[in-house]
Image (cartoon, grey):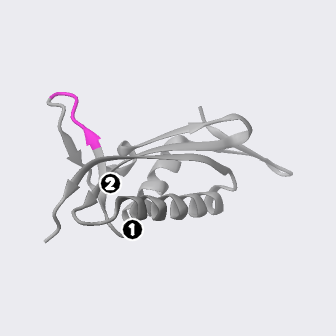
Amino acid sequence: MQGKVSTDLGDIVVDPEVIATYGGTVAVECFGIVGMAAMGVKDGLVHLLKRDSLQKGIQVTFEEDNRISLDFHIIVSYGVSIPTVTENLISNVKYKLEEFTGMTVEKINVFIDGVRVID
């Protein structure tokens, strides 16, 4: 399903992958987040995604009235406060996505799939 915003001049249709890519870019800029995570189907291990495939760690769902729900799968830095990092992630992503799309972010779920020690 795609997001749709109607204006006086016509309709704007936004693909979920665009939302996921933008949200992933905002997320990796947040302090304490190493990157997005993807579960390996073959081996069941969590893998750190490269910058060009961040959207694979995010699931985007459009609810009624063009409200966006997101599921983030992230890897955090060792030693950081998980509640602080996730609150920062949620507030930054919510603000920037609403500004970017003009749609309302209904819900953001964060799944911590791994911890990495940063040198």
Task: Report how far apart the C-alphas of labels 2 and 1 lie in the structure.
Answer: 14 Å
Amino acid at dot 1: Glu
Q: Which mark is residue 52?
A: 2
Identified at 36% across, 70% down, the residue is: 31
- Residue 66: in magenta span: no
Q: Is residue 39 above or below residue 76?
A: above
Helix, strand or loop: magenta stretch: loop
Instruction: State which region is magenta.
Output: 38-42
- Residue 14 seen in the current view: no
Residue placed at 48% from the left, 61% from the top?
87
Q: Position of residue 116 (x, y in %)?
A: 19, 58
Relative side of 71 to 57, left or right: right
In which quarter of the view is residue 69 placed? top right
Which class describes the residues within 10 Å of circle 2: few (<14), some (14-19), or many (20+)?
Answer: few
- Nearer the camera: disc 2 or disc 1: 1
Q: Which mark is residue 56?
A: none
Residue at 58% from the left image edge and 46% from the top image edge: 107
Is residue 78 or residue 70 the one in the foreground? 78
Badge 2 amino acid: Asp
Q: Quadrant of residue 27?
A: bottom left
Outermost residue to the top: 42
Q: Is residue 98 left or right of residue 88?
A: right
Q: Residues within 10 Å of mark 1 (few under 14, many from 20)?
A: few
Residue under label 1:
29
Residue 29 appears in which quarter of the rendering? Answer: bottom left
The mark that comes first in sequence, 2 or 1, is 1
Q: Secondary structure at mark 2?
A: helix
Residue 108 rendering spot, x and y as whole percentages: 52, 48
Is 34 left or right of 71, judged from the image as shown?
left
Residue 8's place in the image compared with 62, above or below, is: below
